[in-house]
């Protein structure tokens, strides 16, 4: 061990570097599924953020009723084909109320993405804190936090969420309530992943060097372990996001999530149960958006897992020819290949080439 590591206040050995950002981007670029998924998600986020501007461009409001666009004789089905698609209503109108479906879908995307992102951030924050405490703490703390994590993982999250959202007063903001419920009940998986990685990393040399340099437990966790935990945490977050989107849609579908008049994809699917014969568009649009969003997050998560895997590059190079390798690295000279050509001396007592005979003469 060097003297610098034993000197108090001396700079410690830097943390083990994670996967290079440029290499990760390169691996993602060669996967068409990752590019398509990222493009779809980026477009969806832009549309959700620009929902008020697009609503103003279309000239519609999210909660404006249009009774003249629905046929009361048919129970409120929209006039026209494809749910009443027109120049004023780009995706038609909602059955029974006549509200613009395009604007409500965009505002529903805002709610779904906001709840999913907020719940995922809360799950990661609690899971990383508990996992680090269990991995770096004493054996008693590890055992206690492990039992708590096991209990959280085994809880029926959806059932408890239904119970909690049913007893909370109606005046409490529902998106915030869903974020708290899903986030505080779903951090068990993150905690297990972080604890397992922490137990592996704490035995490596750079962590030992940081401890010998005088760093405390939480300084080691913040400066040394968290950068190395970025890859598994990001990969697991890409799995949590679509799960939270489905959970929010499920709670809203059951009527205990986002309440009217606030739009939500799950709420639209719940209302569309009675309209799937008269107006199939009202069912297909929110269901299709939900399916595309979940598939895009899943595909991007799989691509991230592959790109962040440090063994992926070596697996991809197996059986391929490395281009641009220097001749000396390949064991070759600038002349002819070994054992070929007339000028090569084949060993003692062997016939020399014509060029060597000319030089000796």
Image: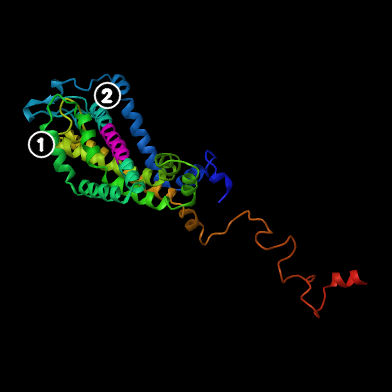
The relative height of residue 327 versus residue 337 in the rendered view (above or below) is: above
In-image side of 153 versus 274 (left or right): right
The percent coordinates of residue 210 (x first, y second) are: 48, 44
Residue 55: name its quadrant: top left
Q: Characterize the local packing of mark 1: few (<14), some (14-19) or many (20 or more) Cα atoms within 10 angstroms.
A: few
The magenta stretch is 112-126
Question: Which residue is painted at 85% across and 69% down in the image?
Answer: 355
Kind of element beneath mark 2: loop
The relative height of residue 94 versus residue 215 in the rendered view (above or below) is: above
Magenta segment includes 114: yes
Q: Main secondary structure of the magenta part?
A: helix
Question: Which residue is painted at 35% across and 51% down in the image?
Answer: 196
Image colouring: rainbow
Mark 1–mark 2 contact, CB under 8 Å?
no
Asked whether residue 284 appears in the rendered view, the answer is no
In-image side of 326 versus 170 (left or right): right
Residue designated by label 1: 274
Asked whether residue 168 appears in the rendered view, the answer is yes
N-terminal-most mark, 1 or 2: 2
Label 1 to label 2: alpha-carbon separation: 26 Å
* Nearer the camera: disc 1 or disc 2: 1
Residue designated by label 2: 87
Question: Which residue is painted at 18% across and 46% down in the image?
Answer: 155
The percent coordinates of residue 289 (x first, y second) are: 27, 37
* Position of the C terminus by quadrant: bottom right
């Amino acid at each position: 061990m060097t003297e610098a590591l034993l000197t108090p206040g001396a700079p410690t050995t830097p943390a083990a570097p994670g996967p290079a950002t440029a290499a990760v981007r390169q691996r993602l670029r060669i996967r068409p599924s990752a590019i398509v998924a990222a493009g779809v998600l980026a477009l969806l986020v832009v549309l959700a953020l620009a929902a008020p501007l697009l609503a103003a461009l279309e000239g519609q409001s999210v909660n404006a009723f249009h009774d003249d666009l629905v046929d009361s004789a048919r129970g409120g089905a929209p006039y026209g084909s494809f749910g009443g698609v027109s120049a004023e209503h780009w995706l038609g109108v909602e059955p029974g109320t006549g509200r613009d479906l395009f604007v409500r879908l965009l505002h529903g995307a805002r709610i779904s993405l906001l709840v999913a992102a907020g719940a995922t951030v809360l799950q990661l924050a609690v899971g990383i804190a508990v996992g680090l405490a269990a991995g770096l703490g004493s054996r008693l703390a590890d055992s206690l936090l492990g039992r708590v994590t096991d209990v959280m993982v085994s809880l029926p999250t959806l059932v408890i969420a239904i119970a909690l959202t049913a007893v909370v007063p109606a005046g409490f903001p529902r998106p915030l309530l869903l974020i708290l419920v899903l986030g505080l009940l779903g951090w068990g998986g993150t905690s297990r992943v972080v604890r397992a990685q922490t137990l592996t990393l704490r035995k490596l040399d750079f962590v030992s060097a940081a401890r010998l340099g005088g760093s405390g437990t939480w300084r080691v966790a913040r400066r040394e372990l968290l950068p190395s935990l970025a890859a598994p945490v990001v990969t697991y977050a890409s799995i949590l996001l679509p799960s939270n989107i489905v959970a929010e849609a499920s709670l809203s579908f059951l009527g205990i999530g986002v309440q009217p008049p606030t739009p939500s994809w799950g709420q639209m699917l719940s209302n569309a149960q009675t309209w799937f014969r008269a107006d199939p568009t009202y069912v297909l649009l929110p269901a299709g958006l939900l399916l595309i969003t979940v598939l895009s997050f899943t595909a991007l998560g799989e691509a991230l897992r592959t790109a962040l895997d440090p063994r992926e590059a070596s697996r991809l190079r197996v059986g391929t020819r490395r281009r641009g390798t220097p001749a000396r690295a390949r064991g070759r000279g600038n002349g002819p290949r070994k054992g070929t050509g007339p000028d090569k001396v084949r060993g003692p007592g062997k016939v020399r080439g014509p060029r060597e005979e000319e030089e000796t003469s």
